[in-house]
Amino acid sequence: MHKFLVDMLICPACHGALRWAIGREENHRIEAAEAACSTCGASYPVQDGIGIFLTPDLQREDLWKEAGTGLAQYLKDNPQIEQRLLSTPLEQLGPADQMFRAIALETKGDFRRSQEAERLSILGSYTPAYRDCWEQQIAYLLDRLEGRSGPIVDLASGRCSLVQRMLSKHGRPIVATDFSLTVMRRNRAWLRASGQDDLVSLLVLDARRTPFATHSIETLTTNLGLPNIKDSGQLCNEIRRILSGIFLAISHFYPPADKNAEAIRQVGLADHLYLDSIMHLMQQAHLSVRALNPCQGSASPTPVGQLIEGARIDALPVAETELQWSVLEVR
């Protein structure tokens, strides 16, 4: 993580000031350190350049860890399937298996071939309308970042797809965040391999209780990240606390009563995946919110695996639908 973050960070548990014991630095980066709260005594490490600012009391499901560990164990238990997954010509694999191949190649550090497998998987997994609307929102967000100064903080960064695009377009310091240490370790390896780690800081944190000082974030972004953050009411209050400028959130929303409604309810995402619901929660938190750059397009259930039978990339949608896309502008 970059040293400039020291002045922006506080204890996520009690908002107390942090005392820093820095063990190793490289130029303008902190590679190993311990930050201790002067108020409650909680401590937060920096390991291999990744700041870890999780509090122990919030429940989390690390799906990145579960997916990666589960796939690795499955392939270890089924070496003949792993051999077919990695040796079959990429174009002959189904879209789901192409994504599993991408993940398997990542674990081996082969990011170039992994990205090609992921690219083909996306082409086969999502409708042209889905991909077109998504690309429109990314382009709109990148344009909105023009002329803004200071670091960009990205919430629920996952595998840093938006971070990659922001790096290519703007070349500004970016703070990528996610509560999964697994995916952040993957991101550090990718950034090092691609020679792009100079501008990116990696923080493991829970967006419901971040380590950012009050009103310290001028530019906040996320790319389809809101549904990955449970308890949207708590999230909205935290955004209100840390935001001093603008939050741009690429989002898509379901019709309120289509065939996906029960599945959305079962996974607890009704607050996130209906436009009226998320706007109401943000307004309750005294945030100003607008849905900009609207786009509507069809979406289908993603394909299931053939080599890795029955595995699916996305849990939603479970039925054909028309998604409403936009960039939420939150102030």
Image (tube, rainbow, N blue to C red):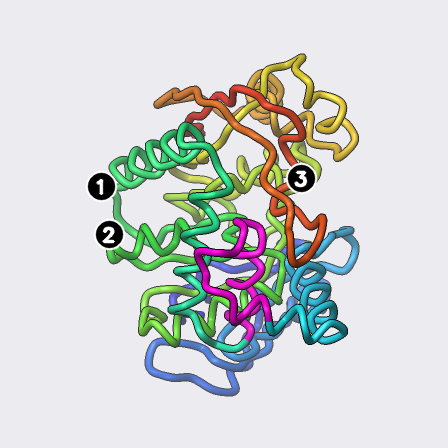
> In the shown orientation, is residue 259 left or right of residue 105?
right
Looking at the rendered structure, the kind of residue marked 3 is: Ala
User: Label 3 belongs to which residue?
Assistant: 315
Assess whether residue 91 is covered by the magenta stretch: yes
Query: Farthest left residue?
Result: 147
Mark 1 falls on what kind of element? loop
Q: Residue at left 68%, top 57%?
A: 308
Q: Few, some or many C-alpha atoms within 10 Å of disc 3 (few <14, some 14-19, many ≥20)?
A: few
> In the shown orientation, is residue 315 left or right of residue 219?
right
Question: Which of the numbered marks, if any, corresponds to residue 170?
Answer: 2
Give how far across and how far down residue 176 sits, in percent: 46, 57
Which quadrant is the C terminus positioned in?
Answer: top left
Mark 2 falls on what kind of element? helix
Assess whether residue 83 is covered by the magenta stretch: no
Q: CA distance from mark 2 to mark 1?
A: 8 Å
Report the predominant secondary structure element of the magenta stretch. helix
Give how far across and how far down residue 253 sits, in percent: 55, 24
User: Is 110 or 281 nearer to us in this picture?
Assistant: 110
Q: Which one is earlier in the sequence, the residue at label 2 or at label 1?
A: 1
Q: Which one is earlier in the sequence, the residue at label 2 or at label 3?
A: 2
Q: Residue at left 67%, top 37%?
A: 234
Which quadrant is the N terminus positioned in?
Answer: bottom left
Name which quarter of the figure residue 36 lies in.
bottom right
Looking at the rendered structure, the kind of residue marked 2 is: His
Question: Which of the numbered marks, if any, corresponds to residue 146?
Answer: 1
Looking at the rendered structure, the kind of residue marked 1 is: Glu
